Image: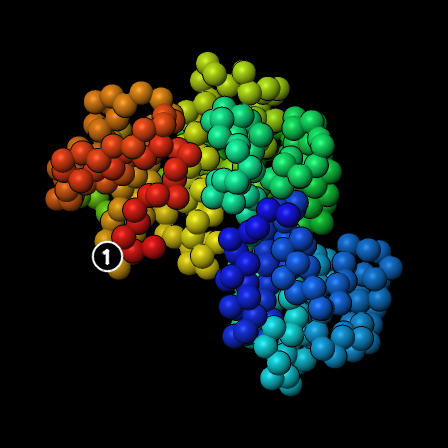
Amino acid sequence: MIKREAVSVLKRLARQFKAVAVIGPRQSGKTTLVRHTFGNKPYVNLENPDIRQFATEDPRGFLDQFPKGAILDEVQRVPHIFSYLQQILDESNIPGLFILTGSNNFLLQENISQSLAGRIAYIVLLPFSLRELSGTGHRNLNETLFRGMYPPVYDQPVEVNDWHLNYIRTYIERDVRQLKNITNLYGFERFIKLCAGRTGQLLNMSSLAIETGVDHKTIASWMGILENSFILYRLAPHHKNFNKRVVKMPKLYFYDTGLVCALLGIQNKEQLAFNPVRGALFENFIINELIKSGHNKGKPLPVFFWRDNTGHEIDVVIEKANKLFPIEIKSGKTITSAFFTGLDFWCKISGQNNGTIVYGGEFYQKRSNGTEVIPWNKLEEINLPFS
């Protein structure tokens, strides 16, 4: 088993809260993590039809089986059980009584969040991070982008492309049916592929609606489903304008680059070498790593991008305590002066002195103004002064 960074956070939260929820995409390792961490607790998988029927028809009797708590896996499958959990948690003083997992963000549902408010902590578990895989010797960039970071493509003897295609069919389509009864599955599949082709681009919902052949409201609904299922996310623009007109549209990214490759029909790592999407995939990959680093520490990073209406852009801006930390992402292997253009402009208008560049090469540099140039495979060395 590859050790997950989130273990320490999970244990800490279980000592402080009566329940802890671990949410994240399917196959990201949630079940393995909680069963390994809480091996003394009974484990119940609510994907099992018989167990789910019992929990649905007699939730009180179902929960009475576990006076010392339990792990409830895929708990979003029985949404009304949360009201009964509320009473149990209110009457108990035992920390870490119930550990919940879910492959969609059930805590965003209003009735559930109201039931569990103040009683539960939660963490987001995404697929492996580079740091977690550091001991596997996996250091080829194109292979990493193509393979993605889902645990099964590392710990099971599977063909990478076959696994991702089956993940899309089996999990995404099943979750779609659970979250909303979509009859136009062909249109939905086309929508997902169109989103993959827009990775790293500004999200234009009207354009997606036209190309998919559905209305704007349908696109917004489908986008919400993929976000709730941890398939993709929108990166918000940073609001600070520095006396410039700034873009207000979000950018679109996926939680795993392997899924993007499968959706775009990329069949092996060699096809990535000269593929025009490679730069966007690399940018997506690095942003994912930054997001994972925050979640794995239990301190989600406020990550944005910045772009003005003339095209000047910073790929990532992290904000905390009124401090801004700019990061530029370059997929090239050779450091050139063009790498610094965006940061130089940013520093000039913002009054800051330096930032960080993450690139696809192998050598670290620190410039005289303090700007760091960090190789992609040493991202853990990035100096976030307020992380």
Mark 1 burial class by Cα count in 10 Å: few <14, some 14-19, many 20+: few
Answer with the quarter of the image where residue 167 lies: top right
Q: Position of residue 276 (x, y in %)?
A: 45, 18
Direction from residue 32 to residue 61 in the image, left or right: right
Residue 345, by quadrant, is top left
Evaluate whether residue 180 shows in this view.
no
Total labels: the figure holds 1
Q: In this orientation, which residue lies closer to the viewer: 364 or 6?
A: 364
Residue 243: give x, y in percent of width and height. Answer: 15, 42
Q: Is residue 14 visible?
A: yes
**Residue drawn at (30%, 39%) of the image:** 327
Q: Amino acid at mark 1?
A: Asn
Camera-side residue of 329 and 303? 329
Q: Is residue 69 above or below residue 265?
A: below
Q: Residue at x 46, y 35 (%)?
A: 285
Which residue is most to the right? 50
The C terminus lies in which quarter of the figure?
A: bottom left
Secondary structure under tag 1 reads loop
Above or below residue 121? Residue 386 is above
Q: Residue at x 63, y 36 (%)?
A: 154
Query: Which percent across, then down, holds residue 162?
Result: 70, 27
In the picture, measured across the screen, residue 387 lies left or right of residue 173, that is left
Residue 68 in picture, x, y percent from top left: 72, 77
State the residue in front, 326 or 218. Answer: 326
Q: Is residue 186 left or right of residue 379?
A: right
Q: Is residue 70 above or below residue 301?
A: below
> Residue at the location (56% across, 33% down)?
148
Q: Image quarter for residue 222?
A: top right
Report the residue marked by disc 1: 322
* Colouring chosen for the image of the structure: rainbow
